[in-house]
Image: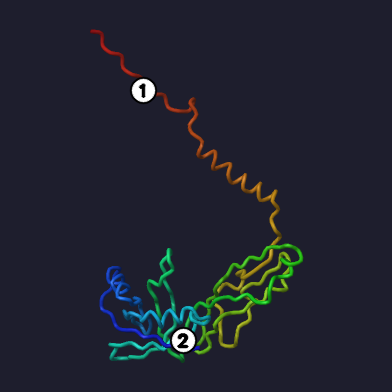
Amino acid sequence: MEFVAEATIRTQSGKGAARQIRRNGRIPAVLYGQGTSRLIQLEPKSIQHILVTQSGSTGLISLRIQGDEQAPQRTAVIQDVQRDPLNGSLLHVDLLEVSMDKPVRVKVPVHMTGGVPIGVKRDKGVMHQSMREVHIECLPNVIPDQIDVDASALEINQGIHVRDLRVAEGIRILDDPEGMVVNVTVPISEEKLSAMLTSEAAPAAEASEPERAADAPAAPATPSEPSK
């Protein structure tokens, strides 16, 4: 899916300039690629619309840049997004310019399908999803919106590794093939959990124990007053 975003060239950089851009109702951004980087500011409505869609993090963006005489329209993908940790507002966006005939490296979200694993449903196991994103390399026009992983058949002590993922032809996964994407484990009993917490708490308690009187350094002797 291809999106459209509006941008303008900016000349100032730094935290102060970025704050001023946000106060003016725009989003500071950097467009990387073709051996250069370009400072731009984005129209917030268009970029926020892209980010809330399912394919926004991987979709191609037709970037219309006002003030760019060399190439007023470029094709890019979102490389990184920074948000305010308190209110989630958009702070900064990194974009990567792409050429349709050259491979690009991007992060694609992992999407779990198939419902609850049988080892969870039947045997009360616990599912752990270790990877939320996968790094891939491919041509821009074949970047998937997501990589689907069906974990419904997993039983206890079974998992799906990176090597097990199925992707379309022309897509190369860059992550370690032995990396665990999702697995189902035996649930920890209350007794074992309590013992683990107790063993972890004991060293901390010893470390924080105040000095005993016998081990504390002796107070310096108060010199006697000279006789008058």
Q: Is residue 165 left or right of residue 123?
A: left
Q: 30 or 105: nearer the eye? A: 30
Picture layout, residue 197 above or below residue 187: above
- The CA distance from mark 2 to mark 1 is 75 Å
- Badge 1: few (under 14), some or many (20 or more) residues near its Cα, within 10 Å? few
Q: Position of residue 123 (x, y in %)?
A: 76, 63
Callout in the foreground (2, 1): 2
Residue found at x 66% / y 47%: 194
Q: 205 or 175: nearer the eye? A: 205
Residue picked out by circle 1: 220
Q: 85 or 175: nearer the eye? A: 85
- Badge 2: few (under 14), some or many (20 or more) residues near its Cα, within 10 Å? many
* Secondary structure of residue under mark 2: strand
- Image quadrant assignment for residue 6: bottom left
Q: Position of residue 228 (x, y in %)?
A: 23, 8
> Looking at the picture, which amino acid does disc 2 mark?
Leu
- Image quadrant assignment for residue 116: bottom right
In the current view of this chain or complex, which residue is farthest to the top? 228
> Looking at the picture, which amino acid does disc 1 mark?
Pro
Q: Which mark is residue 60?
A: 2
Q: Earlier in the sequence, mark 2 or mark 1?
A: 2
In the current view of this chain or complex, which residue is farthest to the right? 122
Q: Is residue 25 left or right of residue 174?
A: left
Residue found at x 69% / y 51%: 190
